[in-house]
Amino acid sequence: MKYTIGNLKFSNKQSISDHCREIIIKNIGKDIEKDDMDFILNLFNYHPDKDKKLKNLKSIFVHNDNYDNYCFFIKYKNNTIDAISWVECIKHIPFGKEMTIEVVMPFGKYKGKTLQEINDNQYLTWIYEKSDADRGLKIKINQFLKYGYVPYNPMTKKENKKINKTS
């Protein structure tokens, strides 16, 4: 599986973690600069509270927290400071493209469009909650609404038969 953060490519999430640790070690007590800042900003875009955390950002630096761990901190334009978890960001990085599937709508006003092309979550929610669409499609729509993508999950023949019997 491959991941791209900014202009850097990683083979797995562990290698992203290792890169974060390298940045922390070389920037203890300093502001993050240049290429490291580009990487960190791209990584922080995966944080679940990114809109709140990255708003009015002035700088990012490495410092120890209350437990003597070195962490990334954000300094805001009003000079307040807040910690941001790079581990939390990595948890929320979606699968690489090769680990997702494209789902094409088989009917309705968006027939032939992929879920990514449909910019109508209200319609997708209606299909998931109230329509008589096939169960497999509903599961994929639910995953898309929840994660923003549909993960590739190869099933065993037994699992596949079970789903086909209940739909």
Image (cartoon, rainbow, N blue to C red):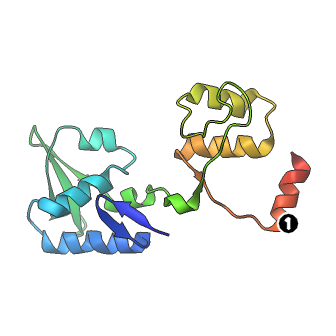
Q: What residue type is labelled 1?
A: Lys
Pick whichever, 101 or 54, lies toward us: 101
Pick whichever, 165 or 68, lies toward us: 165
Q: What element carries label 1?
A: helix
Pick whichever, 14 or 109, lies toward us: 109
Residue 32 can be seen, yes or no:
no
Query: In the image, what residue occupies the spot 48% across and 56% down?
Result: 94
Q: How many numbered marks, from 0 up?
A: 1
Query: In the image, what residue occupies the spot 66% across and 61% down?
Result: 153
Q: Mark 1 points at which residue?
A: 158
Q: Looking at the image, is 69 positioned above or below residue 78? A: below
Q: In which quarter of the image is the C terminus?
A: top right
The quarter holding residue 15 reads bottom left
Query: In the image, what residue occupies the spot 85% across and 66% down?
Result: 158
Image position, residue 130 (x, y; %): 75, 27
Residue 151 can be seen, yes or no:
yes
Q: How crowded is mark 1: few (under 14 residues within 10 Å), some or many (20 or more)?
A: few
49 relative to 20 in the view: left or right:
right
Image position, residue 120 (x, y; %): 56, 27
Query: In the image, what residue occupies the spot 10% across and 39% down?
Result: 77
